[in-house]
Amino acid sequence: MVTKTGTYRGTVTAQGNKIVLDDGVALPPGTDVLVTPEAARRPRRGSPAAVLKAMRSGPHLTHEDAEELRRVIQQSRADVNWRSPFPPSRKQRQGVSGK
């Protein structure tokens, strides 16, 4: 069997003795490989790669967890008092426009 040469990415297992290749790449048993460890690259903050990484990492919520979170947020919403905590200025008391 002839294997196409190229560059494949993978991750070392938790035991540290196996490499799991990404994207479903499967090499035949006995294939000679050269492994070059790379420094862990962090995606740029806010980039699509960073968002995908965050989505794939835990914690993973169940539907019930998400509904509970929505319920608690809804219950914790407070009415907003838009009045200023400061006394009105002389212009405001006299009804003079600042324009």
Image (tube, rainbow, N blue to C red):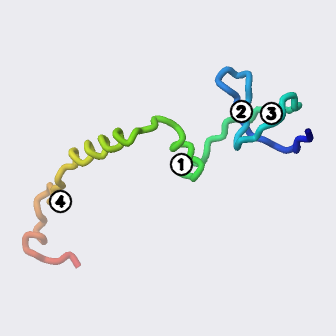
Q: Which residue is mark 2?
A: 20
Q: Which residue is mark 4?
A: 82
Tell me the crowding category of disc 4: few under 14, some 14 to 19, or many 20 or more residues within 10 angstroms, Cα based: few
Amino acid type of the residue that numbered disc 3 sits on in the rendered structure: Thr
Q: Nearer the viewer, mark 4 or mark 2?
A: 2
Amino acid type of the residue that numbered disc 4 sits on in the rendered structure: Trp
Verify CB contact (< 8 Å) between mark 4 and mark 1. no
Q: Looking at the image, is 7 positioned above or below residue 91?
A: above
Q: Which residue is mark 1?
A: 51
Tell me the crowding category of disc 3: few under 14, some 14 to 19, or many 20 or more residues within 10 angstroms, Cα based: few
Marks 4 and 3, how far apart at CA? 60 Å
Verify CB contact (< 8 Å) between mark 1 and mark 3. no
Q: Residue at x 80, y 33 (%)?
A: 36
Amino acid type of the residue that numbered disc 1 sits on in the rendered structure: Val
Verify CB contact (< 8 Å) between mark 1 and mark 2. no
Marks 4 and 2, how far apart at CA? 57 Å
Residue 59 lies in what quarter of the image? top left
Circle 3: element type: loop
Of callouts 1 and 3, the N-terminal one? 3
Q: Residue at x 10, y 75 (%)?
A: 95
Q: Which residue is mark 3?
A: 36
Marks 1 and 2, how far apart at CA? 23 Å
Q: Looking at the image, is 73 positioned above or below residue 16?
A: below
Instruction: Name the foreground residue: 25 vs 38.
Output: 25
Locate residue 60, reporting x and y percent: 45, 37
- In screen coordinates, is 63 left or right of 97? right
In what quadrant of the picture does the C terminus appear? bottom left
